[in-house]
Amino acid sequence: MIKIFIAEDESLELEYLSYIINKNKNMKVIGTCNNGRDAVKLTKQLNPDLVIMDISMPLQNGVEAGKLIKRYNPDIKIILNSAYSEFQYAKQAIKYGFNDYLLKPTEESKIIKTIENLFDFIDESKSILSNSTEDRFKLVETIDLFNENLINNNLSAGLEIVESLSLLIANQINHRAKMTYIDHFLLSIETTLRNIKSTKYNIFGHLSSFLEDDLTFSNINKSLRKICIESFSIRSEETFSITIIKNFMENNFSNPEIGLNEISNIFFVNKTYLSRVFKQEENITVDSYIETLRLNRALELIDTTDLKISDIWNLSGFKNKQQFYRSFNSRFKMTPMERREKNDKFNK
């Protein structure tokens, strides 16, 4: 019997996962919670075989909670439950050796199969991700570099990166490990393209169709080159629009480099033209829109977490403390600490 603990702050998702798992005679949900801090505490008490962890939770996100659980008991397996827009957190999970991930919304068969796969093998050398920390970090760095070039529409650089990525994947220990690395790559492309634009494709499924069955280096390289070319083709299909620009900003405002200049370069549109059209349609400048997104995120983190203020301005996309405090004071007429103290008094 596989003992499973679920940490999920969306009540419907929690009920859905619990129902699916408890239907299976080989699995049992032994506990649940709705925040990362309780997940760490209850996991120590209940000692489950597996924790299914939502990434975005109050008090402590799934990645941070998972790291603490792994530190306490490395044998506990962890599956992260993630949305496409949260792939930056899923990348951290790769680095820290979590066992797998699920993409919301997830089909019942995929959930059960993912859990079963983790417990098929006793030998830790056959775990789904490579045991090499160096490989995991290199995978994340290589994928990041590929997506940088996908955003900048640099196909030739993307094809060069595919060569080193193919070798990294081909050197993994078995078919499942190779497929997991490939899935991470396809997921990252899905996330990047959806952050830039709306698209008609089920991108992950569409790109998966280019994979060869036998994962030799030659076949991996050939498949990834096709995937690369198709990704850049999808990247170039749709024209510039304010809706696409807003979608990109809403998914990337936490990057402190994102601003009018960077966006105009990414979308190959004149900076002055973009500025004028955006102001006409949204009645706000591009940089003010991004600042509002960052301030709203900072406010949410102050109100719902116990993160340090220094972590909050960094996670919200501000370049430095001075910029954050100046913007926060101007918008809310109080300092971040005054906001937190006000909430603390109200909640007592």
Image (tube, rainbow, N blue to C red):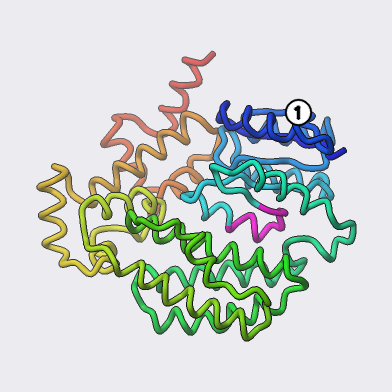
Say which quarter of the image contains residue 269.
Answer: bottom left
| Point 12% across, 54% down: residue | 277
Q: In which quarter of the image is the N terminus?
A: top right
Say if the magenta span includes residue 99. yes
Secondary structure of the residue carrying tag 1 is strand
Say which quarter of the image contains residue 271.
Answer: bottom left
Q: In this view, does 7 lie above or below 203?
A: above
Q: In this view, does 154 lie above or below 41?
A: below
Q: In this view, does 77 lie above or below 208?
A: above
Q: In which quarter of the image is the C terminus?
A: top right
Q: Disc 1 marks which residue?
A: 31
Q: Which amino acid does label 1 sit on?
A: Gly
**Which residues lie in the magenta part?**
91-100
The front one of 113 and 318 is 113
| Point 79% across, 61% down: residue | 127
Question: Position of 112 compared to 281: left or right?
Answer: right
Question: Position of 154 compared to 277: left or right?
Answer: right
Say which quarter of the image contains residue 48.
Answer: top right
